[in-house]
Amino acid sequence: MPDSPSNILFVCTGNTCRSAMAEAFVRQQYPGISADSAGASWYQAQRAHGHARTLFPAGELETHQTKGIESVKDEPYDRVWYLHTAQHRSRTLEVFAENLVDSIGADVEDPYDGPLEDYRECLEEITRLIIGRLGPPSAPAPTG
């Protein structure tokens, strides 16, 4: 049975690739669910990586600014899903209650600074994992 959160935070390392793409996918495909993203090891505000922006041609990531998990610790999330256990679990648990924190379902490798194809494969994996948690989306998946 699919999970039914109303407000999800996705956590990756720097909030430029994986978590940003997960947030954009949920915002685009699941209109009844609020999504946000942040980095466990974030250090400065910047835009989403160019390849991540390319995969969302409708502009979902054009205004994305990275942020760290500390900056959103008081938001009313009902799920906090990290994208890589070894890299994000312990840091996420330092900030959020254990009952909110879980893996997205598998470790998603970081495509940072790889070719566009790495980002495309990463988004495909994120999409599969989110659908596995939330059930089928209400809109067609991005084709970027």
Image (cartoon, rainbow, N blue to C red):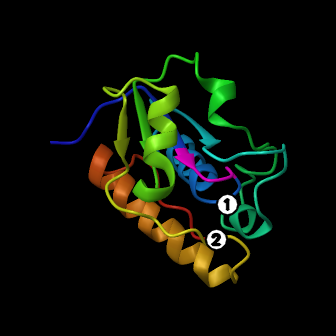
**Residue at horizontal 45%, vertical 42%?**
90
Query: Residue 118, position in %: x, y?
Result: 59, 80
**Residue at horizontal 64%, vertical 71%?**
144
Circle 2 residue? 144
Q: Could you tell me which secondary element the residue under label 2 belongs to?
A: loop
Circle 1 residue? 56
Instruction: Specify the amino acid type for callout 1.
Output: Phe
- Main SS, magenta region, reads loop
**Residue at horizontal 70%, vertical 49%?**
60
In the picture, measured across the screen, residue 112 lies left or right of residue 45, that is left
- Residue 66, quarter of picture: top right
**Residue at horizontal 37%, vertical 50%?**
104
| Res 135 seen here | no
Q: Split into 4 quadrants, where in the image is the N terminus?
A: top left
Residue 124 lies, with reference to residue 32, above or below; the image says below
In the picture, measured across the screen, residue 59 lies left or right of residue 137, that is right
Q: Earlier in the sequence, mark 1 or mark 2?
A: 1
Q: Nearer the viewer, residue 65 or 67?
A: 67
Instruction: Specify the amino acid type for callout 2.
Output: Gly
The span picked out in magenta is: 11-15
Q: Local crowd at mark 2 within 10 Å, few (<14), some, or many (≥20)?
A: few
Q: Local crowd at mark 1 within 10 Å, few (<14), some, or many (≥20)?
A: some
Cβ–Cβ under 8 Å for marks 1 and 2: yes
Query: Residue 15, position in %: x, y?
Result: 67, 50
Q: Could you tell me which secondary element the residue under label 1 belongs to?
A: loop
Query: Residue 13, position in %: x, y?
Result: 62, 53
Question: Is residue 49 rendered magenta in the image?
Answer: no
